[in-house]
Image (spheres, grey):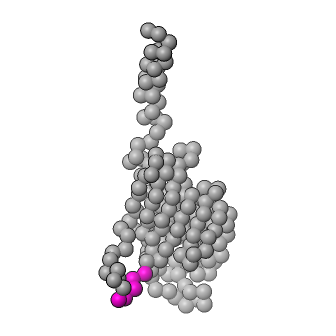
């Protein structure tokens, strides 16, 4: 057997032995992303902004429901801490449906619908419970799924709108 044939055979054997260990299955990756979503819900409800910020990559961008952009975990943590000290200090976040679409083995777009109750307006008056949807880009770095970009949006049904009866994202 010549050197090239030996190299090809050795590579094929190595790939068959190493590949299942080195790369997670899509089901494992999906479960890992769902665990990140569960950790978001837990961190929010415990008002633990360190844990919340720890879900993001160092270069993450977060656009909150009012259109403000926060860059990096430190800014995401700082601003969430400010609103959790007042508006959200008694809030309860509930994850609903999670839709995961892999764009590449280490990149996924996630749509997470959520519900929120117990929050308050800036003047302290209670708000009505509401629902929203997160659009998030997850990346897998060093074997760990993290959020690198997020856009949070309140779901609003506008009476009389031709799309008023359409269902929010699943």
Q: Residue at x 57, y 58 (%)?
A: 148
Q: Residue at x 43, y 19 (%)?
A: 9
> Would residue 140 appear left or right of 163 to someone viewing this image?
right
**Is residue 42 in view from this perspective?**
no
> In the image, residue 58 lies at what x, y percent?
64, 56
The magenta stretch spans residue 134? no
In the picture as drawn, the residue positioned furthest to the top comes out as 1
Up-down relation of residue 80 to residue 61 (above or below): below
- Which image quadrant for residue 100? bottom left
- Which image quadrant for residue 147? bottom right
> Would residue 159 appear left or right of 93 to someone viewing this image?
left
Quarter in which the C terminus is drawn = bottom left
Up-down relation of residue 133 to residue 143 (above or below): below
Q: Residue at x 46, y 54 (%)?
A: 108
> Would residue 71 appear left or right of 148 to someone viewing this image?
right
- Which image quadrant for residue 82? bottom right
**Is residue 107 in view from this perspective?**
yes
> In the image, residue 136 lies at what x, y percent?
50, 62
The part of the chain drawn in magenta is 156-160
Q: Nearer the viewer, residue 108 or 91?
A: 108
Q: Residue at x 45, y 33 (%)?
A: 19
Q: How many numbered tags mark residues here?
A: 0
Q: Nearer the viewer, residue 40 or 3?
A: 3
> In the image, residue 163 lies at what x, y percent?
35, 80
> In the image, residue 57 lies at what x, y percent?
60, 55
In the picture as drawn, the residue positioned furthest to the left comes out as 165
> Would residue 124 appear left or right of 128 to someone viewing this image?
right
The dominant secondary structure in magenta is loop
Quarter in which the N terminus is drawn = top left
């Amino acid at each position: 057997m010549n050197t090239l044939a030996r190299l090809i055979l050795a590579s094929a054997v190595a790939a068959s032995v190493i590949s299942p260990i080195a790369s997670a299955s899509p089901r494992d990756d999906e479960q890992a992303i769902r665990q990140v979503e569960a950790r978001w819900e837990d961190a929010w409800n415990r008002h633990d902004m360190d844990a919340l910020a720890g879900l993001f990559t160092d270069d993450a961008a977060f656009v909150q429901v009012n259109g403000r952009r926060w860059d990096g975990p430190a800014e995401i943590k700082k601003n969430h801490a400010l609103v959790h000290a007042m508006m959200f200090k008694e809030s309860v976040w509930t994850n609903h449906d999670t839709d995961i679409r892999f764009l590449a083995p280490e990149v996924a777009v996630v749509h997470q619908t959520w519900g929120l109750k117990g929050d308050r307006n800036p003047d302290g008056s209670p708000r009505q419970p509401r629902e929203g949807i997160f659009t998030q880009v997850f990346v897998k770095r060093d074997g760990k799924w993290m959020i690198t970009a997020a856009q949070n949006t309140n779901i609003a049904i506008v009476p009389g709108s031709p799309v008023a009866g359409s269902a929010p994202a699943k």
